[in-house]
Structure formats: C-alpha cells, structure tokens
Image (tube, rainbow, N blue to C red):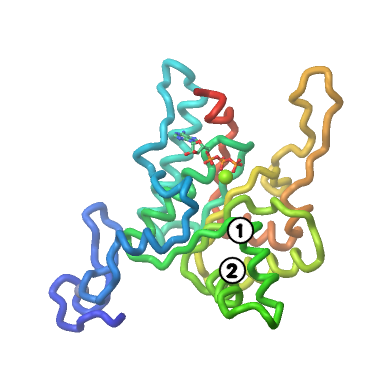
Amino acid sequence: MAANPDCPACQGAGWKHAENGGVVRCGCSGDVGPDERVRKLGLPRKFAAVGFDNFRAGTPYENAIEYNLLTGAMSAAKKFAEEYPFGPKRGLLFQGSPGVGKTHLAVAALKRLAERGFDCIFFDYQTLLQKIREGYDPAAGGSSRETYRAALETEVLLLDDLGAHRVTDWVLDTVATIINHRYNEEKALIVTTNLPVVELGHNVVLSDEIGSRPRVNDSLADRIGARAVSRLCEVCREVRIATQDYRRRR
Ligand SMILES: Nc1ncnc2c1ncn2[C@@H]1O[C@H](COP(=O)(O)OP(=O)(O)OP(=O)(O)O)[C@@H](O)[C@H]1O
Ligand SMILES: [Mg+2]
Ligand SMILES: [Zn+2]
C-alpha cells in the first residue's frame, strides 16, 4: 500500500494533516478506508456499536464526582486517539471495577485510531491466550499462529480484561513476551483490567461489604508478572474509573 508520490494532499507521505491538528492516512495509498478498517478490528458483537458518542457521563447536578470522573476518562481516551502517535505515551491502561465502561472507552479509542488509518486489533485476553496455545499444537491450522503474530506486530493492540486468567508459567511467559516485544518495537498498547495495580498505588484489600472480613485481591502483577506490569506502567497513561457499575447506575 504505497502512497502516490505525486499526491497533492500528502506529497507522497501517505499521511496528511487532519482538521484538528492530528494526522490521518491519505486515501491515495489505496487503503481499504475507515469503515472497512473498523469492521476488521475483530470486535465482539456487543461492542460493535459503542463509541465516544454513546458514552454517557451523566450531569454534574446528578452526581458531580461521577460526572468529573467519567468525563475525565473519556477525554483522556479521546485525546490519546486523536493525538497518537505524537502524544506523551504510547498506550492507555483502563482500570476499574466490573461494568464501569472500561471496555467501552477502550473500544471507542481503538475505533477512532482505526478510522484515522492505523492498523488496530482487538483481543479478549482469555481468547488470545487460548488461540496462542492452540498454535503450539502441530495439528492446529495456521490461523492460531497468525493470531500470535498479530498480537505482536499490529500497530495498535487492545488487550481486554488483562489478567483474567489463572496463572501458569506459560501464561506469564507469553504475556511478558507480547508486552516486551511491543515495548521494544514502540507499538501501542491499550489494556483494560479490573485488577488493582499496586505499582500505581491501588489498594489490594477490599472491605466493601459491610460486616464482611476484608478480602485481599490478586493484583495485576500476581496474574501477569511484575516485569510486564512495570513495562505497562511505563508506556501507558493510566485511566482509572473508580465509579459504580453502569448497569446498576441506570
Ligand atoms: N458511561 C457509559 N455510557 C454508556 N454506556 C456505558 C457506560 N459505561 C458502561 N456502559 C455500557 O455498559 C456495559 C458494560 O460496560 P463495559 O463492558 O465497558 O464495562 P467494563 O468496565 O469493561 O467491565 P468489565 O470489567 O466487566 O469488563 C457495556 O454495554 C457498555 O457499553
Ligand atoms: Mg470490560
Ligand atoms: Zn496522498
């Protein structure tokens, strides 16, 4: 997909300036176009229609704290998606309890990046590990190995629900390899997790149920290893969504 060297819009660079000051891929490169790019993300059906425009932050009159938190999270995601690759960080780390909208915002950002012309891919963490594991089976087809390659090489990877898996040495090695490879190659990584990240100051002791004994949660490092977490914290901007489950809120 080479750009046309005589293109008046991009002068052969393949990328041109967008109205908001960012860059977008130029149509002269014979690109598949924004709609097709979004279709190829591999999004689960549930998230096919989510975006920034249907993310609701409520109003400051109903709940000012929640409103500030959600608008803050949304603008961080939007800013990343518009500025990439020129922003200060090469990734986003969404953290918060179940149902608060982490995947919603992460997918919204991924879609915007795909529209702008970047090669992007979505993987649910558990599905990705399962597919990679199948790839080691000589009887498995090439598609599983292709999956691993895509997780390593695609410019922007969204890993959804990171750490939601029991820990084995194999899992630790595989996740470390993916995160490390992407770190070295300066490829973008967007992750969501509901595990506390001790390295970012999150608390692992939960005592939210009245009268119940405090529980100690696994932290993200317990599930994916401290080295991988340290890399993640270095390359990602943290977007913490410490609010109520959206389904309960409504
Ligand atoms: N602020 C919001 N506005 C509109 N829809 C929302 C909002 N927050 C969440 N939702 C919707 O609620 C559902 C749950 O949100 P989502 O899957 O993003 O949560 P999550 O934080 O990723 O949870 P989990 O940790 O369980 O994966 C989705 O259908 C999502 O589109
Ligand atoms: Mg999610
Ligand atoms: Zn051009």
Q: Which mark is residue 142?
A: none
Residue farthest along the right direction in this orientation: 213
Q: Position of residue 20 (x, y in %)?
A: 25, 52
**At 69% from the left edge and 51% from the top edge, which residue is drawn?**
164
Residue farthest along the left direction in this orientation: 8
**At 49% from the left edge and 49% from the top edge, which residue is drawn?**
106
In the rendered view, does 116 fall on the left or right side of 211? left
**At 61% from the left edge and 39% from the top edge, which residue is drawn?**
96
Determine if the C-beta at disc 2 is less than 8 A from ligand 2: no
Whether 70 is drawn above or below 109: the answer is above
Residue indicated by mark 2: 183
Which corner quadrant of the image does residue 243 belong to? top right
Q: Position of residue 19 (x, y in %)?
A: 21, 54
Badge 1: few (under 14), some or many (20 or more) residues near its Cα, within 10 Å? some
Q: Position of residue 127 (x, y in %)?
A: 62, 60
Q: Position of residue 157 (x, y in %)?
A: 51, 62
**At 45% from the left edge and 44% from the top edge, which residue is drawn?**
76
Say whether marks 1 and 2 touch (CB < 8 Å). yes
Depth check, mark 1 against mark 2: the one in front is: 2
In the rendered view, does 21 fall on the left or right side of 221? left
Residue indicated by mark 1: 234
Front residue of this view, candidates 135 and 97? 135
* Element type at mark 1: helix
Whether 58 is drawn above or below 104: the answer is above
Amino acid found under the numbered disc labelled 2? Tyr
In the rendered view, does 225 fall on the left or right side of 34? right
Ligand 3, what quadrant? bottom left
Amino acid found under the numbered disc labelled 1? Glu
* Element type at mark 2: helix
Q: Earlier in the sequence, mark 1 or mark 2?
A: 2
Front residue of this view, candidates 71 and 158? 158
